[in-house]
Image (cartoon, rainbow, N blue to C red):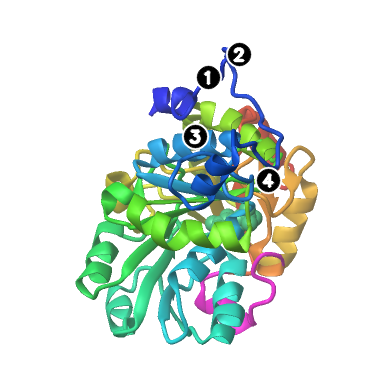
Amino acid sequence: METRAVRAGQRRTMEQEHAEPIFATSSYVFASAAEAAERFAGKAAGNIYSRFTNPTVRTFEERLAALEGGERCVAVGSGMAAIASTAFGLLKAGDHVVCSRSVFGNTTLLFQNYLAKFGVPTTFVGLTDYDGWAAAIRPETRFLFIETPSNPLTEIADIPRLAEIAHSRGCLLVVDNCFCTPALQRPLALGADIVIHSATKYLDGQGRCVGGAIVGGRELLDAEIYPFLRTGGPSMSPFNAWVFLKGLETLNLRMKAHCENALGLARWLEAQPWVERVHYPGLASHPQHELAARQQSGFGGIVSFEVKGGQEAAWRLIDSTRLLSITGNLGDAKTTITHPATTTHGRLSPEARAAAGIADGLIRIAVGLENLADIQADLARFA
Ligand SMILES: *Cc1c(COP(=O)(O)O)cnc(C)c1O
């Protein structure tokens, strides 16, 4: 993993450059009219136009595929573009999707508002309700969609178990691996068919660019996802691909540091008298601690906790910090702090929020790479 993160996918040009170059070109030149015709007809390999392929983007795709253990990766302009491209590539009117209730807000909206408009209904199921998943599948179901660990409560789904449920009924399992990254969890090896990334988060790791990717088997991606990229056009820019390549070089090191800081913070929070409960898969108190230990090689950088005193106390705690960034983003070197009930989950009804376990006093922290003592001291201003 460490070596792939630094080396995979690079091909030097005749200039023998050491770092990956940025190919800032929209199109490519052919040696002759006959060569142009062959490339357009798909009879000869080679670049045509950067909406289809670009060498910097391809290096990023090959490196991420190598890290995820997938045959093929298609890079796109954002995490949501990755999910939309997967949906538009795989689905047709009359198909059906089963999706976890605990997914990124815009994923829910994409399925609910847009896929429905094109004649593809979605059934939403609790992430760990395995009977519910099996019961929701219909003959026309094309894929199941999950995120594990979930946001913000860090619930863990058993990927092999869901893959078995999906495959026994003739559908695919799609896993959004944004929270763990391939440094901590490789869903394809656990039975998933497609992995989704918002490269915006830990793959970049420094909050600089928006991007996304789809990883999976070559046949499936070439036949059903890549043609949508070529025609629909949600392509990744070469500059962003270059930034993500630089991010991937340090991914393993950063994820280790995020995990270490997050575990330290979770344990410290558990000992604070103003904390009601802490959600972190690395704690023995987490209901799926053993599953997380089996399925992941680290517990991740996201910690959430309930502060005593509900929304008033949660807002007071957030406003008392001076170091932490009050922002909804995650996967950054800088620690971020969010109040899910009034931001990321603010559009849910109070009943739906309660059903999802998002308490008014819940706070989510995406633990960054600062010194742990400084993060703790900043949170302790509240006490
Ligand atoms: C941020 C995020 C997305 C969407 O990614 P963008 O790059 O913002 O489009 C999808 N899934 C998860 C889990 C995310 O955190």
Viewer-proximal residue among 228 and 271:
228
In the image, residue 111 lies at what x, y percent?
54, 76
Residue 184 seen in this snapshot: no
Viewer-proximal residue among 123 and 234:
234
- Residue on which the image places disc 1: 12
Ligand 1 lies under 8 Å from the Cβ of mark 2: no
Q: Which mark is residue 255?
A: 3
Query: Which of the two discs, 4 and 2, labels the residue nearer the N terminus?
Result: 2
Whole-angstrom CA distance, mark 1 to mark 4, is 38 Å
**Three-letter code, disc 2:** Glu
Mark 1: few/some/many CA within 10 Å (<14, 14-19, 20+): few
Query: Which of the two discs, 1 and 4, labels the residue nearer the N terminus?
Result: 1
**Three-letter code, disc 1:** Arg
What's drawn in magenta, residue-wise?
Answer: 343-358
- Residue on which the image places disc 4: 336
Q: Which mark is residue 15?
A: 2
Of badges 3 and 4, the one in the foreground is 3
- How would you classify the magenta stretch by its main secondary structure? loop
- Quadrant for residue 332, please give it: top right
Viewer-proximal residue among 260 and 13:
13
Of badges 1 and 3, the one in the foreground is 1
The quarter of the picture showing ligand 1 = bottom right
In the image, residue 292 lies at what x, y percent?
34, 49
Q: Cβ–Cβ below 8 Å for labels 3 and 4?
A: no
Of badges 4 and 2, the one in the foreground is 2
Of badges 1 and 4, the one in the foreground is 1
**Three-letter code, disc 4:** Thr
Q: Cβ–Cβ below 8 Å for labels 2 and 1?
A: yes
Mark 3 residue element: helix
